[in-house]
Amino acid sequence: MEFSAKQIAELLQGTVEGDENVCVNQLAKIEEGQTGSLSFLANPKYEAHIYSTLSSICIVNHSFRPTQSLPLTLTLIRVNDAYSSFARLLELYAQFQKKQATVEQPSFVHPTAQVGENCYIGAFVYLGANVVIGKNCTIYPGTHIGDFSRIGEDTTLFSGVQIYDNMHIGKRCIIHSGTVIGSDGFGFAPDDQGVYSKVPQIGNVVISDDVEIGSNCTIDRATMGSTRIGRGVKIDNLCQIAHNVEIGDHTAIASQAGIAGSAKLGKHIMVGGQTGINGHLTVADHTKIVAQSGIPSSVKSAETLMGSPAISLNDFKRSFIGFRRLPELMDELRALRKELNELKENKDK
């Protein structure tokens, strides 16, 4: 589909600077723009690209003042916030790309399953007994949804998502390919010989509204009760969420983080990539955890943590300065020890 600069400016409540009739039919990064593409400039680090871009339209902030001549073929749309405006266009673009409502064949929909209005069910999808799919959902090919599971309206499940029995997923969620919701928690009990017996996992996973989960994540079902993911939580690719974990609203977790069983994370927490969080602890609201940190015990008040075991960021920085100087300090210590030994030898003579 094509849109003119005038149409885009009206949508974003912006102003056109250039040819209001120029049209675009694709989105592109400013450094990769071609004729007919729409780009944006929000970060000053990328300003140099606007003077050579081949994009037909570029969204900029009202405050942008060019320091060189702009390409003659470039039309600007000035807005209050170029980044958020472009993000809004991306959302609209994604809506245009949404699959048309249909149930492709071959697929299996159990007679007791309920599928809401205007849903796309891709080929080779399996919907088990008593599954409930809300309206306007998009379920891509190869997805499995187990018995008694519920999917809220406007939710998207990409290809290969595996949802076990009796899982509850809220409205407007996005779950990317390869993610497994409801696999057994790592529950094993050793006997007096050290032989492990499996502890049955009979709970479920409850995911609230507006959650996005990246590809190849695992969220384990609870041993009993529910593993809970709060409203608006964002989880990156390759994360492990263990059984009975609770994650508070609007917490963000970056790639390769692992959260052990029964940990309880508060709201608005930021967890860096490759972070490990121990089980059976709590993390206070608004805590920030730097990448590759280890959290062995509860965090009782909001602070920024770094290291393994994690400590206050400022303390870590001071400690790291000392650590970096350790070879130098060791040399100084050896020199002092040598000097001290020489003084002792001279005294004994």
Image (spheres, rainbow, N blue to C red):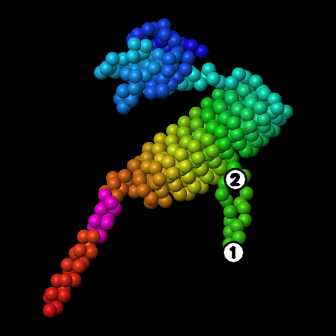
The secondary structure type at the circle numbered 2 is loop
Where residue 243 appears, as percent x and y from the top left, is 63, 52
The residue at which mark 1 appears reads as 192
Left or right of 13 on screen, residue 136: right
Question: Would residue 162 appear left or right of 236 to someone viewing this image?
Answer: right
How dense is the environment of label 2, judged by Cα within 10 Å: few (below 14), some, or many (20 and up)? many
Instruction: Mark yes or no: residue 84 visible.
Output: no
Q: Amino acid at mark 2?
A: Asp
How packed mark 1 is, by other alpha carbons closer than 10 Å (few <14, some 14-19, many 20 or more), is few
> What is the magenta range?
321-330
Quadrant in which the N terminus is drawn: top right
Measuring 37% from the left and 22% from the top, which residue is drawn there?
Answer: 51
- Inter-mark Cα distance, 2 to 1: 24 Å
Residue 319 in the image: above or below residue 241: below
x and y percentages locating residue 227 in the rendered image: 63, 48
**Who's the residue at 56% across and 52% down the image?**
259
Q: Earlier in the sequence, mark 2 or mark 1?
A: 2
Question: Which residue, as the protein is rendered here, is positioned at the far right?
Answer: 111
Q: Quadrant of residue 92?
A: top right
Q: Return the x and y of residue 293 as percentages of the image width and height.
A: 46, 54
Please, what secondary structure does the residue beneath circle 1 have?
A: loop
Q: Is 196 situated above or below 274?
A: below
Residue found 74% across the figure and 44% down from its top:
165
Q: Residue furthest bottom?
A: 349
Q: Of 285 and 41, which appears nearest the observer?
A: 41
Say the numbered circle drawn on residue 90. Answer: none
Please name the amino acid that badge 1 sits on.
Asp
Tell whether 259 sits left or right of 151: left
Q: Which residue is mark 2?
A: 184
Would you identify the image quadrant in which residue 152 lies? top right
What x and y, as percent, mark residue 90? Answer: 54, 24
Q: Is residue 326 magenta?
A: yes
